[in-house]
Image (spheres, rainbow, N blue to C red):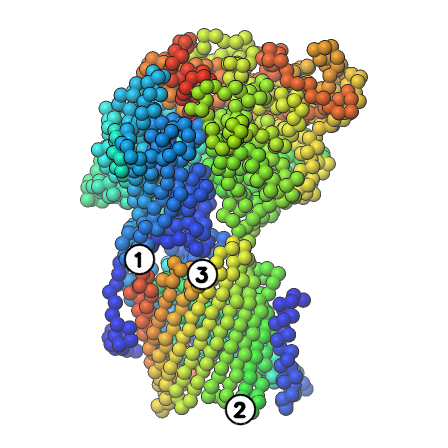
Amino acid sequence: MKLRTFAALALTIPLLPLASAQAEETPDTSAAAWNIALHGLVRTGFDSVADDERYDFIGRYDGFALRNARLSVDATNPAGFAARLSIEGATDIESGGTTPAGTLDARVRDGWLAYAPTKTLQIRAGQFRPGFLAESNRDPESYPFATASLVATGVTLGAGFETAGLALDRGIGAEVNSGTGIVAGDLTVRVHAGAWNGNGANQQLNDNPSVAFGSRIEIAYGELVTLGAAGFKNARTGGELPDRYQESDTGTAFDLQVAAAGFSLFAQAAQVATSYETVGSTDRLQAGWSAEAGYDRAVGAVTAGLGYRFATLDPWAEGSDARIHEHVTEQTIALRLGAKLGGLPAKLVVEHTFAEEFETRSLNNDRTQLTAVVLF
Amino acid sequence: MLRRTTITAWALGLSLAASGCSDTPPSRSQARTVTHRDEVPAGPRALGDVGDLLLENDKVRVIIQGPGDSRGFGVYGGSLIDAARVDRNQRSGDSSGGFGKDQFGELFPSFFLQAVAVDSVEVISTGDDGGTARVRASGKAGDFLELVGYLNRAITGSNDQPGIATSEPKIAYATTYELEPGANWLRLIFRVENISPEPLVFPGSAASSLLSVIGLPTDGFTVPLGDVALFGATSSLFVPGAGFDLRAALDRSYDAAIDWPAFPGVVADWVASSGDGVSYGMMVAPSTDNFVIAKQATYAPVAPFGVTEQSMLIPFVTGGFTGLFHRQAPASLPAGGSFEVTKYFVIGDGDVGSVLDTLLPLQGIATGEVRGTVREALTAASSEEVKVTVRKRAGDRFLPYASYKLNDGNFGGKLPAGDYDAIVVGEGRPLSTPAPFSVVVGKPTALDLTAPAAGRITVRIVDEAGQPMPGKATAVSNYAVEQSNRDPRTFLYDRAVGESERTTDLVVDTEDPLTRRYIENIGWAQDGQAVMLVRPGDYTVVGSRGPEFGIAEATVRVEPGATASVTLKLSRLVATQGWIGADMHIHSIHSIDAAIPIEDRVRSLAAEGVEIAVSTDHNFITDLGPTIDQLALRPWMTSFVGLELTSLESGHFNGYPLAYKTGPVGKGAVGWSKRTPDELFTALRELGSEGSGNTIVQVNHARDSILGYFSQYNRNAFTTLENRPGVFDRFTSPTGPAFIGKDNKTTYSDNFEALEIVNGKLFNEIHHFRTPSQLPEGPQPADIPLAGTIVAEDNDAAFPGVVDDWFQLLNLGKRYIGVGTSDTHSGDDEAGYFRTMIHAGKDDPRDITAMDFVNGLRSRDAFATNGPMLTMTVNGAPLGTTLTGITAPVEVTLRVAAVPWVKVARINLVRNGEIVRRFEIPADRDLAGNPWTETFTLEPPLAADGQPKDSWFVAEAIGDTSMFPVVRPLGIPPLLITDAVASLAAPLGLGTDEYGVLQPPLSFPVTAYAITNPIWVARGTEFAPPGTVPLARQKSPDNDPRWPNPPAVERWADRWADPATKQKNLRPTPIVSLPMQSLFARDPDHPADIRRIFAAFAGHAGHEH
């Protein structure tokens, strides 16, 4: 067993006594029948990006968008076994940086097996998103905005100079987590610790003999406040023989969520440091943070809300003085409506984003986006 | 849903409080220092690295290398080394390189032939203000070629003492590279500044004195400035008027009468290239000091489209270097004064047309536009795999002017007003009928063209068991008898419009169609399947797999648009158990002068039966191994990593096996500039993957003029010692620290291990050239040595050969491993011809380790061959053995086996550098089924005192018959600047090349040759070197190996369009005795033997190294 893998799993060992100390119920192992639940969602929308006069790849390719078309199957067993298979029918297979050369395709998103011997201990393996950014862990139906923040997704195709975000992609691996959480009075602690290949989703093989490992911990006080912290380390190998090169990413993230009386606040900060072992380039630091505020109120059968988000991403916070101009900031204001349509939860979000680049890379690329999501 | 405008207005109101308004600035250019590898352009020629300077905007990205040694093929940093279009389809770079596709080699300015030793490269303006981004490279005079260093400093006056490169500089140079926002071109401003306290005159006073002493008039001589551009083999150079065949245009220009002080060359207002995904172009700003316009009376008659203040002269293209002269220096420059030359470098998106779309407006030329479509003749579908060459009327001819690639069947671009025609060109297709059209300024012209259908041949190559295997398919046809003995460029293919060359058999044409054959195309089958596109017609498809296999043939008729299929079964006819064939000199796309992709290179090696491939790109380390794995060729071949450490003047040296380093741009390649041979050899050894002690250092093509180690270090061909330096050698020989040590002695080192005794098709460098039994038509010297005698001058061979060098080195006890290699650069110079057969004791390449390879070579149980399998034993001992205590006569056994298409005519047994036995092989002998073997006894040789002495033995096998079509003849002779110089000398009444036709032929069919490594026989316990053979005996016809002397095929007579010129050059006129004070006298004591300089430099202009 690699040392790193051992270390990742060892993070969970101190929690095991805590977990077992809980007066949790033991799972019913008598029933052998599986419960199969089919669910999914469709998120579609419309994007309108301002046309920048100087760059013909900005604002020219907007229009209707299919953001998600997901079908998921959850299988659970009273013995504590579970499985999920989630297929996304609108995965971007992008081949272009500034041209609409990408297509949508169907890909597996989640595909994992789990065993939970107790309510506070789950072991799962397969493909899933490692816990890092809290924003990435949100359920689609709870997205407060039409799209994820700049920190998570970066600047996307057609919206500006394409820039990668800090969110971790799904990966094939294994983790130990605290299941529904370790409750201690009003506090609930949720922990994830795992290892994965670190070369992204739907990869046939690992990129190198090493695995990435990471962990996330959340402490929640009821449903009022949740404080989270996460970290990961991933030694990557890129390129093709004979030019294989080694790089390492180390990520840290913190987040805070407060929700009460319809008001919500969310803030996150993350950074990823990259070292270049083979080439010997200066280490790079990517950093970003975002803050959201919102208010939602039920008005009859409809829930209406307003939201504001500030996000900033600096792809070269350190590592190149000449690339400080790649810093991007966005401010988003959103109006959201939720309701049941035919018994199915649905939400409509309309938002406008003011994008601001560094002076020398300033663009005319503000955008308006609309997203409608229906869950089933 | 709320209307977008309403939302926008509402949101805008909010945003005013949040962020305020900002004006939209224009798109920007930027100049900055590269801090991460992902910022540089990628591509096969990409050499940018951290620390270099990047110029970029939304269209293009360019790298200016930082100070230091050039990472390209030049000498100094500060050059433009990478240039790419912004690739919209690529997001970003990574650690292995940036994004974009750079195909450009290097560009640097020159003042006459002097370069700039750049010591500072800096950002002058970042472009953050929205304006032009600028980078400046500055420095003092530098020697691009040391051997013309004195001449350069004398002519330019760049230094206080022309004879001392490090003397006080008088001139400062600077190139400012400017990139405007939104532009796909750069402006280059080359500045020459007089930093001395006194005025400078051009040419310098030292040069004027020098030239007047040797009788050359200096009136009217103006010093040209220009550029040296290395477009790289992956960029096809295009010149208006010459099209893609600049080589032929230069030939014609050298034959034209150009009066001194002008230089011969091709005149054009721009040059451009065509390549995969990117193309380049160069032009100059108009100036009344334009070099060409200042001599318009000379150049106007030879400039197909006239001369302007923007014209350039292309005096040479050699080894990837394109020389461009376009400005003349002023007569004088006051102290502190300066002048500037402005040039433009355009980056297109893959064809010449895209370059012209930018270049013509920059030149201020009013244009119209041509737009067209190309459809297939048979199907009317849009064509894709063709290009369109546009020719412009020039008098009563149409000459190439532009070339376009297709985009969904469409092409087009800007053209000046005029009459044109358009031709569709494609692989495997006949040329379309020229379609005339006219262009009017400001108006579009539409064209609908039809692409003639190609033909296709699919070939399945199998072994005797019917299993697919690697092999080569060659499509051979023959041309009509009416075309007999004509220049094939006039009827068989047109390189000017972009067709590929078709190699002919290079035998005298007769009624027999077998004397009128040519190769239409070849295909390599990695898995038994090969596909060739061919022009419709009748073909003989020849299958082969190297010199251990026979060939198989099938005839096919290929109809337009149709596919003909054949299966060819190849049989292994020559057994080589225990022997492995290795090629230790291989180039691919990572060399500036090679365009063949790695995959094709590996296929070509497997197809020729090479079992050990050592990649040796110029100053770049390549690993073929992963590609061998990807193509599933491991059962057939293996590879080791090597490097050709390529200096400009010290020679070329291979090292292997080496380690491959992913991180550095050159993958571990080291610099060569100003390093002595010992330092180069040590540097190569330190790269070894098995340790420095197990790294083979090999000297390549040692007699290849300026690229040859022995030639450059002035080694006498008969004694191996350094030739006595002439009084004025300091004017004409390299004298820098790489050549002359601090003790004022040569830095020549014999600390290498292997010697490339045969290289590819450099047959003229195998043996010292001897007078043949018959000479072709043409000028002959008055004094011709007897047939079979070495042509010598001043106690040195006039045309030395490495095998004979090696013999004398063996006589002095130097046990260099004799190796044969192909030095293959393209698909036309076949991999594995030559190769070194190594007795490794194993037959499966997968079992060969690096140390097996090294030890096998070091055992010297090896022979070099391009066909014959030649072995020898002495007293039963194999090659490489040192027999000791031998006092009795020795028993020598020779054996040669060969496949039927490899004809061996004779075997020579060489002892101590002299031929002691000759054997004739009957022409009808089946050397595959019945190898020739001869055993005989030899008495020991006697020294002058009558005592027996130690001896070594080498055997060589020589054939007289062409190996066409498996091995192509060397058809197009290399371009010699002696041609230019000779034509330059003619108007001055100085005659032509002094040797005339008494020199090795430079175009010939390739015949069989093999040579073994030695076996040493010592009387005592150690071998006592016998010493060099006395000069008279070396020269004697008794030692004539009787090299093949095929009938001369004067195909190239048609290049002399002028009948008088043709007659003059063909007439066997004796050379007049040249005056001693002539510029062109061949005299080592003469102050400036310019012809020897240029001939030495460009001796292999058409033969890449």
In the rendered structure, which amino acid carries the disc numbered 2? Asp
Identify the residue position indicated by label 2 in the image: A186
**Is label 3 in a helix, a strand or a loop?**
loop
Write the residue at 42% across / 73% down. A289
What is the number of the mark on residue B1069?
A: none
Identify the residue position indicated by label 1 in the image: B128
- Residue B496's x, y, as percent? 36, 32
Spatial separation of the CA atoms under disc 2 and disc 1: 55 Å
Q: Which circle's residue, 2 or 3, is located before the other in the chain?
A: 2
Residue A17: quarter of image: bottom right
In the rendered structure, which amino acid carries the disc numbered 1? Asp
Q: Is residue B837 above or below residue B371?
A: above
Spatial separation of the CA atoms under disc 3 and disc 1: 20 Å
**Number of other residues with Cα within 10 Å of mark 1, as a class: few under 14, some 14 to 19, many 20 or more:** some
- Residue B260's x, y, as percent? 30, 21
**Is label 1 in a helix, a strand or a loop?**
loop
Query: In screen coordinates, is B859 left or right of A189?
Result: right
| Viewer-nearest residue: B295 or B415 | B295
Query: In screen coordinates, is B8 left or right of B991?
Result: left
Write the residue at 55% across / 84% down. A189
| Viewer-nearest residue: B196 or B696 | B196
Write the residue at 69% across / 39% down. B852
Q: Of tags 2 and 3, which is closer to the observer?
A: 3
- Residue B1100's x, y, as percent? 47, 27
Residues at discs 2 and 1 in contact (Cβ within 8 Å): no
